[in-house]
Image: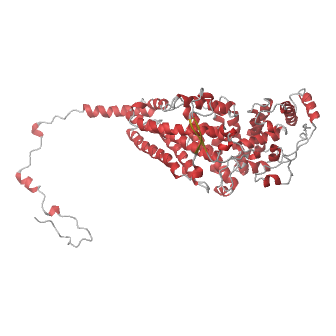
Amino acid sequence: MVYNGIPSRGCYLCRSRKIKCDETKPFCNRCRKSKRQCPGYPVITKAHSRPYPDSRKSVREGTEKSSGSSSSDEEEHFANRWMVYAADRVATASHSVDSTIKIPLHDAASCHFLSNWVLLSPQGTNRGFFEFLLPIQKKATSGSPFHLAFKACSLSSLTQQGLDPAIERQASSYYVKALAATSDALSRPSVATSDSTLATVMLLSLYEIQCASVHGVEGWAAHTSGSMQLMNSRSWKKLNTDLGMGIFVAVRVNLILLGLLQGKPPPTGSDWWGKGTFKDRYALVGLHLSTITSELRHQLDKLLDLDCATLDDFDQLSNLMRKFQALEAQCRNWPETLPDYFKFSVAAWISHRPPDPAKAEALLGPIHSYRGPWVGAIWNMVRTSRIILINSILRCSALIHERTDVQTLPEHSSMAQLYIDVIHEAVAGVPYQLGWFKNRTALLPTMPSYACGQNGAQSRLASFLAMFPLTNIRDHDFATDDQRAFAEGRLQYMAYGLGLRSAAFVESKGRMPSAIILQDYDSRSARQWRYLRSQVTKAAVAEPFEDVPIGSLPAAPTAEVAEDRKPTLESLELPIHPGSPFPKSAQLHD
């Protein structure tokens, strides 16, 4: 059937599945019968209800308009350009998003964004992510900060898929407006800590993930830090609702990821972020271990940047090293405490080495599958934490032994085996996160369910969560050449194939842990410690014996004095236990 420019009034899910919707409000019966969550209905505007020929005509007229046209005219102009662009691609539709190009621009953008970022929880669990966006989106008014931020994220989601580049200009315009509106909302105490404001900040961080530039992930880090500050200022009672808990979990995960990437600790202690009634206690333990990892690494970095380091500060290295070892052992033993549904399984095995690891979807060896992207994300965080902890153990050892060569450290052999194991596991889990099962869905134990009706084995959310172990493997000394090339290739694929530009701009800090050990050796604290220890060594070796005149030596005690100094039987009296049957005056006798 030829598209006439008048969109269907059915729900997003029925439209994406290309079936007729019964349009029952608030949720259609077709979704209910198929046991799917109905994402709701689009708002049909006058601009969307125009017939297709007029839309084509308005495109030609819109190109002649002056730059001083209103924002509504500009929005209509881009909507019409989208219709023309969509019509040109319908006949040769081959892209994964082409199934949505038959609906208006903003509806297609919203559906595409939700189907990539909003992970729905399986029934009876809370292993979803960003689900709080759905109820807030339905209540958001036009022009509100959330409404503007949501449009910016939605349009940028389409732009990163290689569609009409002109849409990126509109997405950027909405982002700037959302920043201004959010800044105004934060200046008003009555709305600064509301669910909508905090959700808006989270959307702004997602925009930066999709549209990062040469500044790397600084934009995402700034918005994540802002969301953490807002969360700290909110009332704890807001966690009693599903909406409040969903926002809290999203902020906490971003906090942990930021700590693993940049070493920033949480603004409050890890115990505070471990609060809340969280149904999945196994995930909570994994999140807590990752949070403590960021805290301990920050303590080490802070210890190496003291203005006036002392030998007492140097003695703290041994204590800190023991903490790293104990925490790494906890992370290593964490899988033994998990139930079957939280463990990974070997879904396939690659029996040959790929000719070009940088372009391969998987390396030689096993391919792991998980019961949902949320479970895989927790595994990624724990594995990334283990790599950071092992790095920190070697850093402490190098500082204590004053060495810069990793291979000469006493812990090298034992840590090398731990590195090999955790990197091998992380590489085996990457294909699941980056859509290797998209055409092999029969191998999956469960199919992930995203909003807007997409049951996807590939999504930007899962890919983003795989970015953190990949950045560690790419620059690691103990990874093989194939593993490093594979990690770099997957990051480039995420940036230019999946639309996560931030993956291409994650800063490389050199080979780890060699580069960081050299950096630690030249730190202010390390230089002061080496100087102080050298002075103590020189004083101990070069200290001369004191020349004492013979006449000034004390005389030997006389026989009478020596006899007086002999211990008497009275001085050998033993203390009597209160419950003893012997009298207190009992003494030893020959």
Tell me if residue 277 comes above or below residue 438 in the rendering.
Answer: below
Q: 152 left or right of 238?
A: right
Q: How is the image coloured?
A: secondary structure
Q: Residue furthest left?
A: 559
Question: Quick one: 488 or 325, which is closer to the camera?
Answer: 488
Image mark count: 0
Q: Is residue 569 above or below residue 109?
A: below
Image quarter hosting the N terminus = top right
Residue lying at the far front in this picture: please name it. 351
Residue drawn at (61%, 32%) of the image: 506
Out of 455 and 548, give the one closest to the viewer. 455
Percent coordinates x, y for residue 98 in the rendering: 79, 36
Q: Quadrant of the C terminus?
A: bottom left
On the image, the x and y values in percent for residue 285 come to 55, 51
Front-lying residue, 473 or 106:
473
Which percent across, then down, holds residue 457? 68, 42
Q: Residue 242 appears in which quarter of the rendering? A: bottom right
Above or below for 353 versus 257: above
Left or right of 543? Residue 386 is right
Residue 514, visible in the rendered structure: yes
Residue 455 lies in quadrant: top right
Q: Would you say residue 261 is visible in this rendering?
A: no
Left or right: where 28 falls relative to 294: right
Residue 183 pos. (x, y %): 72, 42
